[in-house]
Image (cartoon, rainbow, N blue to C red):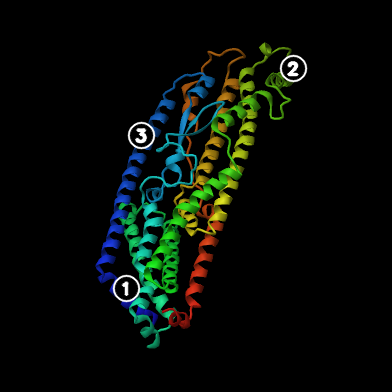
Amino acid sequence: MVRLILSNELKGSLRDRRVQLLAGFTALLLLLSAWSGQGTYTHLADAREQAAAKAEAEWDSLGAYNPHSAAHFGTYAYRPLGLLRMLDAGVQPFTGDVLKVEGHVANEALYAEASRSSSLMRFSAFQPALVLQAIVPLLLIFLAFGSIARERETGTLKMLVLQGASFRQLMAGKALAYWIISLGLLLVTVLIMAMLYGGQMAWDTFALFMLAYALYYLLAALLSVYVSARARRSSGALAVLLGGWLLWVFILPKLAAQLGQSLYPLPSRIVFEEQMREDRKKGLDGHNPSDERRKALEEKVLAEYEVDSIEQLPINFDGIVMQADEEYGNQVWDKHFGDYYQTVQQQNKVIQWVSALAPFLAVRNLSMALAGTSLYDHLHFQQSVEDYRRGWVKALNDEHAYGGSKTGEWGWKAEAAFFQSMEDYTYERPGLSWSLANRWPEIVVLLAWLLVAVGLVAFSRNLSVLDQN
């Protein structure tokens, strides 16, 4: 019976002029957003490739150069663009994905596509993710709001039930019909990606990406049909569903972001940098000034080489001092960015708790995680570059200290071959298991909501239909 109801509802919906217009308009939005996303992706990928090649060429062409000057000259680390970024750019338009690598400084990402926002949890530019997360569920609402309520208004619902179709079968068949229509829009997305990047896709990740949206649409279809069944009139069902959509898509995400920021505020950039400068100057505990650290280091090195002054050292003490200062600065970075990361995690937990009330938040976070464009991915990239920067700076300082110069010889230059031998930065994105491990609460929320929706339909009784006239 469910199959028969599904077939009849699907055929009727596909013949309905209004459904054709709504579905066609949504498909057009999806195509336009995909075209826009593909253009942005191609432009960024080409610009990134050219900039990376230029930075590498500039570094390799340094020639004979002073290592300390080279540390200030610096280079750049570029985060490669994942293909799913075309569908969901996540927070990357606001965070950027290029980092300057230089001595003494752990830089933030550069060249963001959009100006910084007070919240990294807002919508970005027009992109397929916006259509998939917000517009397709809206389409399902307009398809399903009258599915049961209108049958009741016209008097056909009681007739269908009395002829042997159970209420739950009617609801299930209609919900599955609307779900299949939404899956057609997902199929459009699959075809677009297959035609553009079929041979380059990580299909396991893409399959999970599509699965998350498929489950999300099944939830939306089931709830829409259930609300239609409980409402006395189709107009009332539409009002409730539109109110729920606004609550899920706009109100709760905004409240969640504001609540997270108010409970766990992040320091301003000016305050953050000032705190780091103070800690680097005075010491982590405020009782270890830099001049005392230098004096202790000098005494240690002189004792190791059994000489009386740094001028008698067979090495360049300046390089040793710079590396010691760098390592101390690393401790400062670990402390402050560790606090920052912990605060971001606390904010994210607030978002995750609120997502229990709004599955839209759950699927949005899952989408960004699978696309590799979440805030966690950005922080992982930032930490990866910092790890590289530390090894890169140490190699330069060691060359300055032990490469053949003496203390005070700031004009000494290392051979060009040394700089050319330094390893370039390459970023390896964490695996799929890492992405999902950070988003298990969202997975639980989405599945729990789906289980509730299935339960609401499965345990609906015919009596509730016959009583509501």
Instruction: List the residue tagged with mark 2.
Output: 306
347 displayed left or right of 162:
right
Q: Residue furthest bottom?
A: 163
For mark 3, does the 10 Å Cα neighbourhood hold few (<14), some (14 to 19), or many (20 or more) residues?
Answer: few
Between disc 3 and disc 1, the foreground one is 1
Can residue 245 be seen by looking at this rendering?
yes
Question: Looking at numbered disc 2 in the image, what kind of residue is underneath it?
Answer: Glu
Q: Position of residue 438 (x, y in %)?
A: 55, 52
Instruction: List the residue tagged with mark 3.
Output: 50
Identify the residue shown where x is 58% and y is 38%.
266
Q: Position of residue 328 (x, y in %)?
A: 65, 28
Instruction: List the residue tagged with mark 1.
Output: 10
For mark 2, does the 10 Å Cα neighbourhood hold few (<14), some (14 to 19), or many (20 or more) residues?
Answer: few
Q: Position of residue 365 (x, y in %)?
A: 49, 53
Circle 3 sits in a helix, a strand or a loop, which is it? helix
Labels 1 & 2 near each other (Cβ < 8 A)? no
Q: Name the N-terminal-most of marks 2 and 3.
A: 3
Along the line of sight, which residue is nearer the eye, 99 or 59?
99
Q: Is residue 29 above or below residue 326?
A: below
305 displayed left or right of 246:
right
Q: Name the N-terminal-most of marks 3 and 1.
A: 1
